Amino acid sequence: MSEAEIVPFWSRTPDENYRRMIDAARRSHAFGVDLDFDATGWSVGSVRDRRSGRGTSSTTTLWFTTGSMKGRTAAFVAEPMLEPFASFIKAYVRLYEAARPQLNMSGHGNAIRAGRYLYAALSDKARDPRLLETEDFRRAAELASRDVAEGTVPYRIGVYLARMATFVSDRGIAGRRIDFANPFAHEDHKTRISPEAEAARDTKLPSEAALAALGSIQVTGLSDRDLLLLRVVQLLACAPWRIGELLTLPVNPEVFEAATHNGVPMTDTAGLPVMRYGIRYLGSKGWSWDVKWIPTTMTDVAKQAIRDITRITASARAVARYMHDNPGRAWLPLPYGGGPPDRLLTPPEIADLTGVRNDHLGRNAREIIYDNGIPVQQLPGRRIACRQGDFEAFLLSRSEALPEGHPLARHECLMLVHRNFFHSLKGEQRSIVEFVDYPAVQEFLCGRAGSGSIFERHGLTMPDGSPIRMNTHQFRHFLNTIGQRGGISQLEMAMWSGRKHVAQNAVYDHLSGYELAEKARTMIETDRMRGPIRIAFDRHPPVERSAFLQVHLSTAHTTDLGMCLHDWAAAPCPHHGACAAGCADCAVVKGDPVGRERARQRLTEAEIMLDKARAEAGDGTCGAANFVAYHERLVAGLRAIMAIHDDASIPDGTIVQLPALPAPEEPVRRVG
């Protein structure tokens, strides 16, 4: 057999597959060709900042140790993982990076963390991944579920353990099939009506006091530094932005377009066309250029924010434009700008140009020169000077650049400021430009040691006197929740938020059980709900209908198929979670793509199980008839759900309550 002939992994031994995997990982160029594969810690270089889309100077080290190195002191010594598991987990991480390069290293850190639990589960098998079985992954998951002291999120660890199990099976490393799925439920699948759910919801949404305080800040008298950041925060409240999308807005991002309804142009009371207002932006997480349309009630706020930001950043963008039009030259004020590179600049001149005369550290220009390695020339009288060309090269090296391949030039970005623009003590360096970044916005909202937040500086606190704290992503959760309350479709919500998948909406839906019930009651009153409750509602006199709804729709929560109208506070589920098997409390949101796909999957599985149950019943297996009866009800219920989704006569977004199927006969009838 020639070397070029492909040999499937199942024709080789686990030991051969293991060695081939390690060899492939050693030959990989992921993390760089000079990576020391055998090192306990891998320094993987600069990490791309996911919030801003720009590179940062920080480095990350991946530690292949039995304990986490995060937050440890220099005196802490972690034990390196033993072979052959150490090479296995290193190969897994490097090959995964080669196949799917990561924006930052947190995913690889979680994979190593999951690997530590698997490493512990293999303690009685010499830490040998070639001896892995499904039970070892289950033991690792059990260890993760008990490791609450380290702040473990079991669901996340389960995700990486499942990926690792697939990796081991697909490469034939263990010589047997690993049948392991994540045993932990996602936290977002929990009930919405528990105290824990209320507490979790509060952490992801801005408090009413924080929103009120933000609205009470007077623009008059604010410095340009605070005004710029206030306008950024106000834009966050206008649409569900990711902070990185907002901080990379282009210049002139406003879009005006005639509004239409069902393809017909809309006009106001005066007969003039209604214009809608949006902001053009570069999306993230797989979303390209798009327009974020601003609700009518917030357009004036957004327009004023764009005007103020454009004005405040104009001078920095002019500097960036000069550097773009004059490659290799830094912007300097007259009479230095565009001067000969051989002109000599004295320390007092450099002090003026760098702003160190106003530096709170009391540094002089000589320190700037020597600390940054700017070449000097000796002059008579122990004086020194620098060539203007060398000084400009220093300035250029300090200006922040965009990553390679970015679709915009630096001067085409809106959020550009001078160096030290946000610093309260250092002098502003007008020849150096940098981008408005996430830490500046977060410090504006929360403050830091020695610098109070915008709320603290205006004497604003929570009702109990505690400091106001909020983060940029809370606005995105808040606006998504408002959209859910208003009945916006899931597709529209995903597009407005810049998501590729509708299913991701669920993470940002923080309606409580009572709010969901209120939404359902409103839909009944506006003829957007069908089913037994709606029929009973119509039969009641108008004066009794509101009270009827309060009793029969006091609370609700979401399910993978739609909604559950059962009041769990009054009694547990009478059907043990079998929503589709004839439960009248099960409701479907017609046209919901996530619910429809889940129903389709479950119907396929239920039909397979029904066929198997019927085969067992035909063979006379004891108890098989009960399984046949249950799966017949389940298949009937799921087919009814699919029929609702496929019914063109039902408008999308309508809540349809399933009809109750006849109750199964009791195997033993009560006597007396």
Image: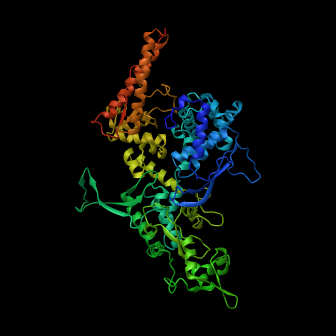
Residue 335, percent from left and from top:
51, 87
Colour treatment of the image: rainbow
Q: Nearer the viewer, residue 425 or 227?
A: 425
Quarter of the figure with residue 22: top right
Residue 453, percent from left and from top:
59, 64
Q: In this rendering, does residue 581 appear at all?
A: no
Asked if residue 255 lies left or right of residue 147, the reply is left
Residue sticking out furthest to the front: 2
Q: In this rendering, does residue 389 appear at all?
A: yes
Residue sticking out furthest to the right: 75
Asked if residue 48 lies left or right of residue 496, the reply is right
Rendered position, 417 above or below 332 = above
Asked if residue 296 lies left or right of residue 232, the reply is left
Q: Nearer the viewer, residue 217 or 280?
A: 280
User: What residue is at 68 percent from the left and 46 percent from the top?
Assistant: 68
Quarter of the figure with residue 584: top left
Q: Nearer the viewer, residue 437 or 263?
A: 437
Rendered position, 568 above or below 671 = below
Rendered position, 149 above or below 73 = above
User: What residue is at 62 percent from the left and 81 percent from the top?
Assistant: 357
Residue 653, percent from left and from top:
35, 41
